[in-house]
Structure formats: structure tokens, C-alpha cells
Image (cartoon, helix red, strand yellow):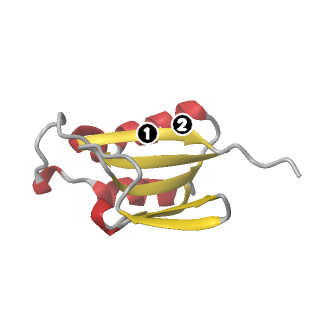
């Protein structure tokens, strides 16, 4: 079962400390367990574009759709046995301490 982990900034989280950033170990463990599908950092929210089509007209605006203090800093897609395993991996991500990790199961299209 695939899960999307949204890696988010959170101004209420503990202060980021580079020496406590264990992302290399986290990625290595996912690779060892054959869970990683894809993952990467994202450019800052100010580099985003929001695309909408209204009444057939394309509307592109700078920045994210929502104005919030939090932003999505990256993502990971994991292939886990179940939600419990996905939550365990999310809790081990360093951004669970320095930000937050939102876990969403994929909802495959039934065509």
C-alpha cells in the first residue's frame, strides 16, 4: 500500500539543529527495507504557482493557494505493508521533530 508523506515546516516545532538531522539514516533505513518509491525536497512556497481553470479561462497565480505559516518542504512516497508501518516511518523522520509529517494513503482510481 502506498502512502504520501508530506514533510512540512511548523513554527511551533522544536528548533532545527543540523547535528540532530538524521535524514540520511532515515532514507537508508527505507532503502534497506525496500519502502522508498520516491522523495525529494521542494522549492520554497514563494516559487509555487497555483493553476485554476474557471469558465474555460486559465488562471495562474504566484505562490501557494493558501496563506499559512506552514509550508510543504518535501515529500516521500513509501510502499508500506499498512498504515501502522507508514506511521512508524513518519515518526522516525527528523521533520517529525523539527516540523510535522502528514501521512496520506493513496486512493487509486478505479477505471
Task: Describe the element under mark 2 as helix, strand or loop.
Answer: helix
Q: Which residue is mark 2?
A: 85
Q: CA distance from mark 1 to mark 2?
A: 14 Å
Q: Residue furthest top?
A: 84
Q: Position of residue 20 (x, y in %)?
A: 16, 50
Q: Position of residue 2 (x, y in %)?
A: 63, 48
Q: Measuring 24% from the left and 41% from the top, which residue is drawn there?
A: 10
Q: Is residue 75 depicted above or below 85 in this figure?
A: below
Q: Give the secondary structure at mark 1.
A: strand
Residue 44 in sight:
no
Picture disc at residue 28:
none
Residue for point 64% across, 40% down:
81
Tell me if 27 is positioned left or right of 14 in this view.
right
Give the class, few, some or many, for how many residues have Cα within 10 Å of label 1's Cα (few <14, many ≥20): some
The disc label shown at residue 102, or none? 1
Relative to 17, 37 lies left or right: right
Q: From this view, report whether residue 83 is shown above or below residue 22.
A: above
Q: Nearer the viewer, residue 111 or 88?
A: 111
| Residue in the picture at 44% in, 56% down | 75
Observer-nearest residue: 39 or 63? Answer: 63
Amino acid at each position: 500500500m502506498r502512502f504520501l508523506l508530506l514533510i512540512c515546516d511548523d513554527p511551533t516545532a522544536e528548533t532545527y539543529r543540523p547535528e540532530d538531522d538524521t535524514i540520511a539514516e532515515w532514507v537508508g533505513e527505507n532503502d534497506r527495507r525496500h519502502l522508498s518509491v520516491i522523495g525529494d525536497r521542494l522549492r520554497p512556497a514563494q516559487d509555487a504557482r497555483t493553476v485554476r481553470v474557471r469558465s474555460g479561462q486559465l488562471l495562474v497565480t504566484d505562490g501557494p493557494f493558501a496563506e499559512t505559516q506552514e509550508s510543504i518542504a518535501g515529500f516521500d512516497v513509501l510502499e508500506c505493508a499498512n498504515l501502522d508501518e507508514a506511521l512508524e516511518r513518519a515518526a522516525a523522520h527528523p521533520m517529525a521533530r523539527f516540523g510535522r509529517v502528514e501521512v496520506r494513503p493513496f486512493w487509486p482510481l478505479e477505471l
